[in-house]
Image (cartoon, rainbow, N blue to C red):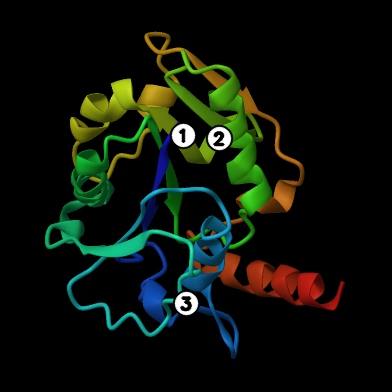
Amino acid sequence: MKIAGIYLAAGQSRRTGVSKSSLKLSPEVSLRSVVLSELDRCALEPLVVVVRADDQLEWLPPAGEQRVRRTETCLTAHLGLSFSLRCGLNAILPMQPDAVVVALADQPFITASLVNRLIGTFERNPGLDYVTSTHEGMVMPPALFSRGMFTVLQGLDGDKGAAEILYSAEYKGVVLEPDAVRLFMDNGTPFDSGPIRKEWSVRGES
């Protein structure tokens, strides 16, 4: 079974007012590089990193020797999340994957272990439309979508994510409980940066 990955790293940081490419967890670690390094540890083929046209890619970590990773420039990223997702989907479709894992760039505590749980759940239950996780009663990315959902994902519009799909009774999915609450800390507002950097510091010392 072939599972692809889409890493959405083309966000404009409208809520923070700061470019995500400039955000760092420490002087040496870029926010966006962290989750990508975790995704590199998963069996995602291919792993497509969706970026903006003006991204200089200094944050991009080296890909593992055995991993199929490529970047995809999305010229319409400024129109909303759904456009970045569509760019990523168009890039993976020629590979004909059985499913795709979609991850966001502003959740630095997402781990390869969580992504592999999504993949493992789908491999044991290939009739599912999606597999995702929950935090405080809300479904959260990253999420895995079966091939049958690709057309539905391509039909999303504007800055909407896939939440309307994950909450719909029309589709069959599994929602996993996370191993740790901090997995879903994100950099959605300027006020989140301090707690995230503190948590990262604690993690580095443990």
Residue 77 shown left or right of residue 35 in the figure: left
Q: Amino acid at mark 3?
A: Pro
Q: Quadrant of residue 197?
A: bottom right
Q: Residue furthest front?
A: 66
Q: How many marks?
A: 3
Residue at position x 36%, y 72% from top?
17
80 sits left or right of 141 in the view: left
Quadrant occupied by the N terminus? top left
x and y percentages locating residue 47 in the rendered image:
39, 54
Residue that badge 2 annotates: 119
Q: Which residue is mark 1?
A: 144
Name the N-terminal-most of marks 1 and 3. Answer: 3
Tell whether label 1 touches label 2 (CB within 8 Å).
yes
- Mark 2 burial class by Cα count in 10 Å: few <14, some 14-19, many 20+: many
**Can residue 18 be seen from the camera position used here?**
no
Distance, label 2 to label 1, CA atoms, is 7 Å
Coordinates of residue 182 in the picture (x, y in percent): 71, 53
Q: Which mark, by number, is residue 123?
A: none
Q: Front-most of 68 and 138?
A: 68
User: Helix or strand or loop: what does disc 1 sit on?
Assistant: strand
Q: What is the spatial separation of the Cα atoms under label 3 and label 2, in whole angstroms?
A: 23 Å
Q: On residue 61, which mark appears?
A: 3
